[in-house]
Image (spheres, helix red, strand yellow):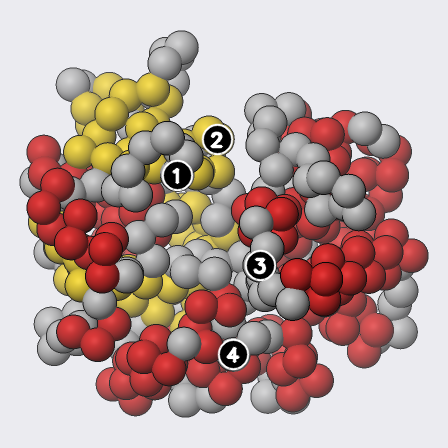
């Protein structure tokens, strides 16, 4: 059994549910009100099983593993074997979060990120130590200074899930039940933990039926970067100068333009070292996007008045320019997001 610490009780509760269904012990790091609710009532994930028209409700208290919640200042890492980063990147700038993350780094705990924004320590595995130019893309770049890059890996957060606005904070609904795709650690012992979780989650059954949303572990460090094409094509283009639009509309309103930005981003990741098998074909993504009928989390956050969001758009732009590559559509995306955040601020 692994003892897993998960930062974030929103999207992180999906990964946490998969772990407790597989018999592991999970502690969610979250706000006071969330921790109190979860410790009293557990979490609930509404997940569609293959072939069913409606969702199946999974409750943490019904699972073989254990789930608890705590605040950042009360975390005890003495028995932790793996850390999951599932909060939005700007949230790591909070002093109590920054201190806890520094403690985790100094203890040498393996950390798996399911953020859209890859930790700077992970980017060092891809680009080497010269990542200083990327720091302005992060709300909290110094948080990642103390990590051994071999103990940080990235998982593409492909499953789509939201907290229903009419439900309590401990409820999560999965809209697209795809898989988490993680790269191996640079540290073999840490990768062994990932492989164990992969096997245990794959073996989970509900009334004899297979349960979607698996963990898939890949040898290539570029596999999680396949999400970059999806983010630029759908998530960030859901942000407009007017009201936010759904990811489906962002992709399908002008399919030719969508394929262009998608392919350009794939080419950039290939230039960095990815192989063709590391990518997701545009047709497959476009088909999946048909079911994404809500705005992206980034678009919803801006519409709600946020003045900081994860800036994967700016990160990709900065990396591309470093290598003499430019894309007009990407430049427009970055400008629109910059202007929206500035207006909110």
Residue 341, horizontal then vertical, whole percent: 68, 62
Q: Quadrant of residue 319?
A: bottom right
Indicate which disc, 1 or 4, sits on the residue closer to the N terminus: 4
Is residue 305 at least partly visible in the picture?
A: yes
When asked about the image quadrant of residue 268, the answer is bottom right
Please tell me how crowded label 4 is: few (under 14), some (14-19), or many (20+) other residues with Cα within 10 Å.
some
Q: Mark 1: few, some, or many residues within 10 Å (few <14, many ≥20)?
A: some
Left or right of residue 58, residue 12 in this image? right
Q: Residue at x 52, y 79 (%)?
A: 140
In front of the other: 276 or 198: 198
For this view, does 37 lie left or right of residue 145? Answer: left
Name above or below for residue 282 compared with residue 12: above
Which is closer to the viewer, label 2 or label 1?
1
Q: Nearer the viewer, residue 80 or 210?
A: 80
How far apart marks 3 and 1 lie (CA) works out to 17 Å
Residue tagged by mark 1? Answer: 163
Q: Earlier in the sequence, mark 3 or mark 2?
A: 2
Task: Using the numbered discs, state the Cα–Cα distance from disc 2 to disc 4 in whole angstroms.
Answer: 30 Å
**Disc nearest the viewer among 4 and 3:** 3
- The residue at the point 73 percent across, 58 percent down is 340
Q: Name the element at disc 3.
A: loop
Question: Distance from label 1 to label 4 (Cα)?
Answer: 25 Å
The N terminus lies in quadrant: bottom left
Which residue is the site of mark 2? 176
Distance of mark 3 from mark 2, alpha carbons? 25 Å
Q: The residue tagged with tag 4: helix, strand or loop?
A: loop
Residue on which the image places disc 3: 306
Q: Is residue 337 left or right of residue 135?
A: right
Q: CA distance from mark 2 to mark 1?
A: 13 Å
Chain-order first, disc 4 or disc 3: 4
- Percent across and percent down for residue 297 are 55, 46
């Amino acid at each position: 059994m692994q003892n897993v610490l998960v930062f974030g009780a929103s999207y992180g509760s999906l990964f946490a549910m998969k772990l407790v269904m597989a018999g592991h012990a999970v502690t969610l790091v979250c706000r006071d009100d969330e921790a109190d609710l979860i410790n009293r009532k557990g979490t609930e994930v509404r997940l569609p099983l293959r072939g069913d028209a409606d969702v199946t409700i999974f409750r943490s208290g019904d699972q073989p593993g254990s789930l608890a919640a705590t605040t950042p200042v009360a975390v005890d890492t003495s028995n932790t074997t793996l850390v999951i980063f599932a909060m939005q990147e700007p949230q790591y700038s909070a002093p109590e979060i920054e201190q806890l993350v520094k403690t985790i780094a100094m203890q040498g705990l393996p950390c798996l990120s399911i953020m859209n924004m890859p930790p700077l320590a992970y980017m060092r595995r891809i680009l080497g130590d010269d990542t200083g130019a990327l720091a302005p893309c992060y709300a909290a770049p110094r948080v990642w200074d103390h990590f051994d890059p071999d103990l940080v890996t990235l998982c593409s957060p492909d499953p789509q899930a939201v907290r229903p606005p009419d439900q309590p904070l401990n409820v999560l609904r999965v809209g697209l039940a795809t898989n988490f795709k993680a790269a191996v650690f640079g540290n073999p012992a840490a990768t062994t933990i990932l492989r164990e979780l992969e096997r245990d989650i794959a073996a989970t059954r509900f009334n004899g039926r297979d349960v979607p949303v698996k963990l898939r572990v890949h040898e290539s460090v570029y596999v999680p970067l396949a999400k970059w094409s999806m983010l630029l094509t759908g998530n960030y283009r859901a942000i407009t100068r007017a009201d936010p639009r759904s990811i489906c509309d962002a992709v399908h309103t002008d399919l030719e333009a969508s394929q262009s930005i998608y392919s350009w981003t794939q080419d950039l990741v290939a230039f960095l070292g990815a192989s063709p098998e590391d990518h997701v074909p545009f047709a497959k993504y476009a088909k999946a996007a048909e079911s994404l009928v809500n705005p992206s989390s980034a678009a919803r956050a801006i519409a709600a008045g946020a003045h900081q969001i994860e800036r994967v758009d700016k990160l990709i732009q900065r990396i591309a320019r470093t290598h003499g590559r430019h894309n007009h559509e990407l430049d427009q995306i970055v400008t629109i997001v910059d202007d929206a955040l500035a207006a909110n601020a």
